[in-house]
Amino acid sequence: MKDLFDSENIEVFKQKPLAERMRPSRLNEFVGQKHLIGKGKPISTMLDKESVVSMIFWGPPGVGKTTLALLISYSIDADFIQLSAVSSGVKDVRESIEKAESNQKYYGRQTILFIDEIHRFNKSQQDSLLHSVEKGILILIGATTENPSFEVISPLLSRCRVFTLEELNKPDFDKIIDRTIKEDIILKEFSIEFEDRNFLISLSNGDARRLLNGIELSFRLSLPDAEGKVLITNELLKDAFQTNYIKYDKNAEEHYNIISAFIKSMRGSDPDAAVYWLARMLKGGEDPKFIARRMVILASEDIGNADPYALSLAVSTFSAVEKIGMPESRIILSQCATYLSCAPKSNASYMAISEAENDVNTLPAYDVPLHLRNAPTKLMKELGYHKGYKYAHSFEGNYIEQLYLPKELKDRIYYNPSDNGKEASLKKYLEERKRKK
């Protein structure tokens, strides 16, 4: 396998950021993701068989998506082209495809096109990749922090394997720290100790790049003694990371506790508590789109028809957050959270579908009443399909009493509107309808 740095000038290499200097040059140096690169696991198996397919890496920042793509390219001796979806367009993609075609035609060499933040490509940009991926002109590796099911078009998704990269854990970070202070071309010349490694790891927010940047800056802020010993204190780390420590691990119990508190505060109509927990999540590095998605769910589950506008606002919030980004998105999230907190509440729609699903799952699949069935053919009409159906708009008030449920469930009531907000008028309408029976 080629060394990523085999042609680097040493002095030029020293000027690179620590995170770049410590980028693994061999697969056995890569930390984490054993479920993908361990013995017999998917990516290892592909490399062993020299049969690499297009893939999407989905995971949080700083877990090794770019590095793993690079290591794959070196493992199979493929040409590596890297694009960022933030700054690249269709023209860049087409130029990459042309280069891949040339590599394949004239040199018999594979090309890996790595697209960072592929979720930022629009539909036409993603469409431009389809043919070359399907025909094997290039191997696409896309990296995204967002759920590919939502952000990558289905035709492209179907042509790629999706691999989820997990957030690094404490043992992973310990390995990275040990390797860094022992092997980095600059840091290995000193004897470096940390006042509290756990504090350092907590400040990294699960991001190895952030960890290494913090180590590098705190080292520059430190004063080695005459023997070259360096103690990196917590105060130095705070200065380097320029952040206050917040107990918020996106994969641990506190993450679920805080999102639970946020949801329950809105459900309990407390806007002050809602914005506090919102601020905690944002400070802890939570994905704003994750927060927005949860509010879309709450708007329907806990507010529903008591204020139908709540769902429209929540969906608009998700769309705005997606387009605007941080830090401005915090204002949009706050507007939505406070509105949802103050809106009248009802879980009647949620209860309705839950009870209907229970019947569907536990009772026989009853027949559709004949008068409700479609009758596009003469035979169906002769069998009584559609016969006796009453068109509601032909009657006063656009309503006429007839059976819509299977006859076995004719007395079932799934939707029980509350007395809150706009749902009170729906309840009144249904009650008046019953009186007319």
Image (tube, helix red, strand yellow):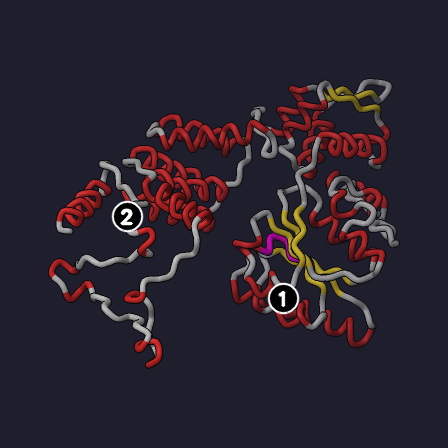
**Crowdedness near tag 2: few (<14), some (14–19) or many (≥20) residues, C-alpha within 10 Å:** few
The amino acid pointed to by label 1 is Val
The numbered disc on residue 327 is none
Q: Nearer the viewer, residue 248 or 259?
A: 259
Please identify the quarter of the rendering in which residue 149 is found: bottom right
Residue drawn where x is 63% and y is 42% of the image: 61
Relative vertical location of residue 373 with respect to residue 221 in this rendering, above or below: below
Residue 139 lies, with reference to residue 248, above or below; the image says below
Checking the image for residue 411, the label placed there is 2
Q: Identify the residue position indicated by label 1 in the image.
A: 93
User: Mark 2 or 1 closer to N-term?
Assistant: 1
* Range of residues picked out in magenta: 114-118
Visible residue check, residue 299: no
Q: From what the image shows, is residue 98 above or below residue 52?
A: below
Identify the element where label 1 is drawn.
helix
How many numbered discs? 2
Q: Tell me where residue 233 sits by quadrant.
A: top right
Question: Is the N terminus in the top left, top right, bottom left or bottom right quadrant?
Answer: bottom right
Q: Residue at x 75, y 30 (%)?
A: 171
Residue 116 magenta-drawn? yes
Looking at the image, residue 123 sits to the left or right of residue 385; the answer is right
Image height of 134 relative to 83, above or below: below
Q: Main secondary structure of the magenta part?
A: strand
At 61% from the left edge and 69% from the top edge, which residue is drawn? 130
What residue appears at the point 86 percent right and 19 percent down from the top-left corner?
Answer: 227
